[in-house]
């Protein structure tokens, strides 16, 4: 399609409105699955189409088409433009005028690879795991990669494009000891090419899958209650994602729904703490050269020196708050309108020593290091996250292993109750997915932190 | 709706796959049209119109199996050639095959045998949708102890049509319409604390659809949480409303899935035919109810479904075994998953939530779960809860910051009562359920 045709479609759509963008996507996803020692299922999937969005004031019209010929796009444009009958325009949006980043690439192009090159990765992983522990009874592993070609054109005559590679390897292992069964899952996911596949990757994942199995069989749900929680570096970043990140998404704040709606510029945690949402981490799962509104990827400080300094904006909320978009406009696919979403969310290093120092300062509590999922109630700020494994802390020492407990807290209270932050920041390499009516890949990270008081499930 | 020409194209693609090296194949064509009007604070905020069409292809090539999908129906031949090539790269798997002919559904031909498709769908206009969405709004409502700060509503309707066909002659079709409205409200109390509440309704039929009262219920749910207190932890009786109890049933149904059983990754391994739960628990896959959401005559392979007990008086009666996994387990195949689970009342019919609370007397009424998860191997669970402390069958106070912890087998052994108040708009019919002596973590 020519630029003049794109302009004609956008002109049709934006009649009576403030802004229109077209989001073209062609995604090809390939997967291979190992089960019972053989790579006996696999496939590929293709998704292709264009989403048309029209903004009129803060109101949105959206339509998409799986055929990207001129007439189909015009039909979608008219459907999206129907919002203008129910809204009043307030004037055109401002152009972004920033240069797209280059935070991921393919050293080895997926398009030049055959899926058969990757069956060995799965077989090798299966072999290492089975040989590494006689208690292994089942291994399911899935290797997948995708390439998304994105093009965005809007009524400001901005044209941007992106090629987004994504590679993931996930393994789920079942162990049996006597009549007891336990399971463990490990994943790695990065935005990169086929260089993702290496002997190191297999060795590292096999090692992680077999780590802590003894403790898993010894572990039990602890006696629940309110206690101090030391969150290990890396995957504990789910705390930031659930307890703070969602509540900092600007749409919730623009609508007055977030517990942080009226707290911009106020202190939310102790001095020295910085919490960022960063699209610029090389090859990280949530990185973006441009977001799904064509805004360049960037690093956004949500909390600076303990003070709330920025929400996460798409174009709508940025205009509402009279700030520049932060490049957080994201969508699952062309089927969805963009919303403010997190990317790679983490806390920068603190200066309160090591994780051992943090554990040593706790009389009774738990140390947690593996997680399954989390959730938040935006208005109340109440969050939960599910702990797959950890240890009880008694008198400053790790004692018995714990597992399968839910932890509940309140976002603003937990932030203000962060007592100590170590200097061991790690960003989790796992295949994290954030859901908000639509799914997007993210990552999260944190240095080890001590929170004074959370409610821990148990018996 | 899928047209004859689309089905002809599907047959042509199947013929091409067979001529190109596949020994068998299954194709599923699905089409969905959907429209939505969203409101924010009593005004239209969003409109959307969507049309989706995609084909899923399962290929059986030289004893190997691959699964593929695309929404580029104009390019099926080259897609199939590539797919067959990829399938050949995989390992052989003797258990991959189409279902036996005698198991396949033959009574789903025009797609509306279960009467789930409302012909008046096509008459709904854009202005009707705006009316549905706006008239349901309660923006401006006032209360003595709260201020309404946000109301986000969404009316949507859809029409879906899908066809499953395979190279052994299977042809199954199902058409469905749906009309839905959901709303989330946020209120603020005198101290500036926010509370949110969500409620929704749905129907396959426009004539049965009514959004009246949905906003009020969302508002009631939000404002009733004001003043939530931290209650002491301990063992309480637990009453769970039907919409929330559905979440407790899911891990049990997942544990009966053949893939989990085959991998020994289920807390219900070896349970078939054994009494595992309380005699009070009976769950039926009530999948042939005409005009009721969740009903279906066939599963994803085209295998005929049947209304059968899944759990009967506490005894496990059914694993969900598709053709492949049944072969691997050396068991008789059933269907791939439960279609429309219905939990039966106990000990008597006719109890609603309040009657169940009166029967139980004192405990925690759970109206929603906030996060949490379970261990699929052991059945251990831990969830955050939203709800109320009650005594003598009457609500005393909303609770906050509470967690419930336990094991699913133990939990479903401790059933105290099961109501008859499942919401008809849900595809899983779970009424209010009560359990004895459940561990809660609180203050």
Image (tube, coloured by chain):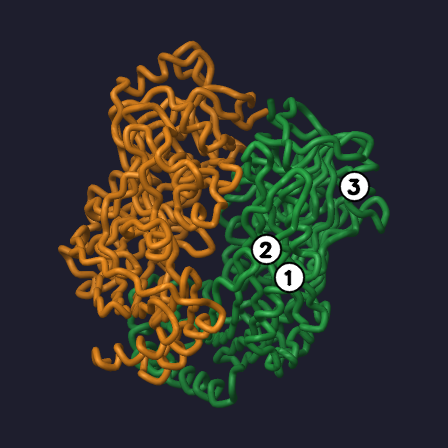
Chain colours: A orange, B green
> Numbered disc 3: what chain?
B
- The verdict on a common chain for dots 1 and 3 is yes
* Of the image marks 1 and 2, the number of the one nearer the N terminus: 1
* CA–CA distance in space, label 1 to label 2: 9 Å
Label 3 packing within 10 angstroms: few (<14), some (14-19), many (20+): many
* Of the image marks 3 and 2, the number of the one nearer the N terminus: 2
| Relative image position of residue A376 (x, y in whole percent) | 49, 40
Q: Which residue is mark 3?
A: B417
| Relative image position of residue A383 (x, y in whole percent) | 49, 36
Label 2 packing within 10 angstroms: few (<14), some (14-19), many (20+): many
| Relative image position of residue A129 (x, y in whole percent) | 33, 40
> In the image, is residue A181 above or below residue A402?
below
> Numbered disc 2: what chain?
B
Q: Are marks 1 and 2 in contact (CB under 8 Å)?
A: yes
* Of the image marks 1 and 3, the number of the one nearer the N terminus: 1
* CA–CA distance in space, label 1 to label 3: 34 Å
> In the image, is residue A193 above or below residue A267?
below
């Amino acid at each position: 399609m020519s630029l003049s045709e794109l302009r004609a479609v956008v002109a049709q759509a934006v009649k009576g409105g403030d802004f229109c963008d077209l989001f073209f996507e062609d995604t090809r996803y390939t997967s291979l699955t190992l089960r019972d020692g053989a790579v006996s299922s696999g496939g590929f999937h293709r998704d292709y189409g264009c989403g048309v969005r029209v903004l009129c004031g803060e109101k949105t019209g959206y339509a998409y088409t799986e055929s990207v010929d001129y007439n189909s796009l015009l039909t979608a444009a008219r459907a999206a433009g129907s919002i203008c009958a129910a809204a009043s325009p307030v004037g055109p949006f401002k152009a972004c005028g920033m240069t797209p980043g280059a935070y991921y690439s393919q050293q080895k192009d997926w398009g030049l690879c055959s899926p058969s090159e990757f069956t060995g990765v799965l077989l090798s992983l299966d072999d290492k795991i089975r040989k590494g522990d006689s208690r292994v009874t089942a291994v399911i592993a899935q290797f997948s990669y995708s390439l998304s070609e994105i093009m965005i054109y809007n009524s400001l005559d901005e044209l941007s494009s992106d090629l987004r590679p994504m590679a993931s390897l996930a393994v789920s292992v079942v162990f049996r000891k006597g009549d007891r069964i336990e399971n463990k899952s490990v994943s790695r996911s990065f935005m990169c090419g086929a260089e993702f596949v290496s002997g190191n990757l297999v060795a590292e994942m096999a090692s992680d899958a077999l780590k802590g199995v003894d403790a898993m069989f010894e572990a039990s749900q602890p006696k629940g209650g309110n206690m101090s929680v030391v969150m290990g570096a890396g995957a504990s970043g789910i705390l930031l994602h659930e307890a703070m990140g969602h509540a900092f998404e600007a749409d919730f704040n623009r609508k007055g729904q977030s517990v942080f709606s009226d707290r911009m510029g106020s202190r939310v945690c102790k001095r020295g703490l910085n919490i960022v949402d960063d699209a610029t981490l090389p090859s990280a799962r949530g990185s973006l050269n441009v977001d799904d509104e064509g805004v360049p990827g960037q690093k956004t400080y949500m909390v600076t020196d303990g003070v709330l300094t920025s929400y996460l904006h798409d174009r709508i909320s940025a205009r509402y708050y009279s700030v520049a978009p932060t490049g957080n406009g994201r969508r699952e696919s062309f089927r969805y309108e963009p919303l403010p979403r997190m990317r790679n969310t983490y806390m920068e290093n603190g200066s309160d020593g090591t994780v051992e120092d943090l554990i040593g300062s706790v009389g009774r509590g738990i140390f947690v290091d593996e997680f399954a999922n989390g959730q938040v109630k935006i208005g109340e700020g109440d969050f939960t996250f599910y702990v797959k494994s950890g240890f009880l802390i008694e008198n400053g020492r790790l004692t018995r292993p714990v597992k399968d407990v839910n932890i509940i807290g309140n976002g603003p209270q937990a932030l203000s109750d962060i007592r100590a932050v170590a200097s061991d920041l790690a960003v989790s390499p796992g295949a994290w997915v954030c859901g908000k009516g639509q799914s997007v890949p993210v990552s999260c990270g944190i240095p080890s932190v001590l929170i004074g008081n959370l409610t821990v499930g148990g018996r | 709706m899928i047209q004859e020409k689309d089905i002809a194209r599907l047959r042509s693609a199947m013929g091409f796959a067979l001529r190109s090296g596949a020994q068998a194949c299954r194709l599923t064509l699905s089409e969905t049209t959907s429209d939505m009007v969203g409101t924010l604070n009593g005004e239209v905020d969003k409109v959307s119109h969507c049309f989706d069409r995609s084909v899923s292809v399962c290929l059986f090539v030289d004893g190997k199996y691959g699964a593929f999908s695309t929404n580029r129906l104009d390019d099926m031949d080259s897609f199939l050639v590539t797919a067959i090539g990829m399938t050949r790269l995989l390992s052989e798997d003797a258990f991959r095959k189409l279902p036996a002919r005698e198991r396949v559904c033959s009574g789903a031909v025009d797609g509306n045998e279960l009467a789930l498709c409302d012909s008046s769908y096509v008459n709904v206009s854009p202005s009707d949708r705006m009316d549905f969405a706006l008239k349901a709004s309660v923006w401006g409502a006032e209360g003595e102890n709260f201020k309404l700060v946000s109301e986000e509503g969404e009316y949507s309707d859809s029409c879906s049509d899908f066809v499953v066909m395979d190279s052994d002659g299977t042809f199954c079709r199902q058409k469905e319409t749906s009309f839905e409205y959901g709303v989330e409200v946020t209120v603020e109390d005198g101290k500036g604390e926010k509370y949110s509440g969500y409620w929704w309704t749905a129907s396959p039929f426009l004539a049965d659809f009514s959004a009246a009262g949905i906003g009020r219920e969302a508002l009631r749910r939000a404002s009733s949480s004001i003043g939530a207190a931290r209650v002491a932890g301990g063992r309480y009786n637990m009453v769970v409303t039907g919409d929330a109890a559905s979440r407790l049933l899911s891990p049990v149904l997942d544990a009966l899935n053949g893939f989990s059983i085959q991998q020994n990754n289920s807390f219900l391994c070896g349970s078939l035919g054994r009494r595992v739960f309380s005699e009070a628990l009976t769950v039926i896959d009530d999948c042939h109810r005409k005009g009721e959401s969740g009903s279906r005559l066939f599963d994803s392979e085209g295998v005929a479904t049947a209304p059968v007990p899944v759990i009967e008086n506490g005894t496990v009666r059914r694993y969900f075994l598709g053709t492949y996994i049944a072969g691997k387990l050396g068991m008789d195949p059933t269907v791939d998953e439960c279609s429309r689970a219905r939990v039966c009342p106990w000990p008597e019919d006719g109890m609603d939530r309040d009657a169940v609370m009166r029967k139980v007397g004192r405990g925690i009424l759970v109206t929603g779960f906030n996060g949490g998860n379970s261990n699929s191997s052991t059945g251990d669970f831990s969830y955050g809860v939203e709800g109320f402390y009650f005594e003598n069958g009457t609500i005393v106070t909303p609770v906050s910051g509470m967690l419930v912890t336990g094991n699913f087998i133990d939990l479903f052994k401790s059933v105290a009562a099961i109501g008859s108040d499942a919401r008809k708009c849900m595809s899983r019919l779970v009424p209010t359920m009560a359990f004895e002596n459940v561990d809660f973590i609180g203050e």
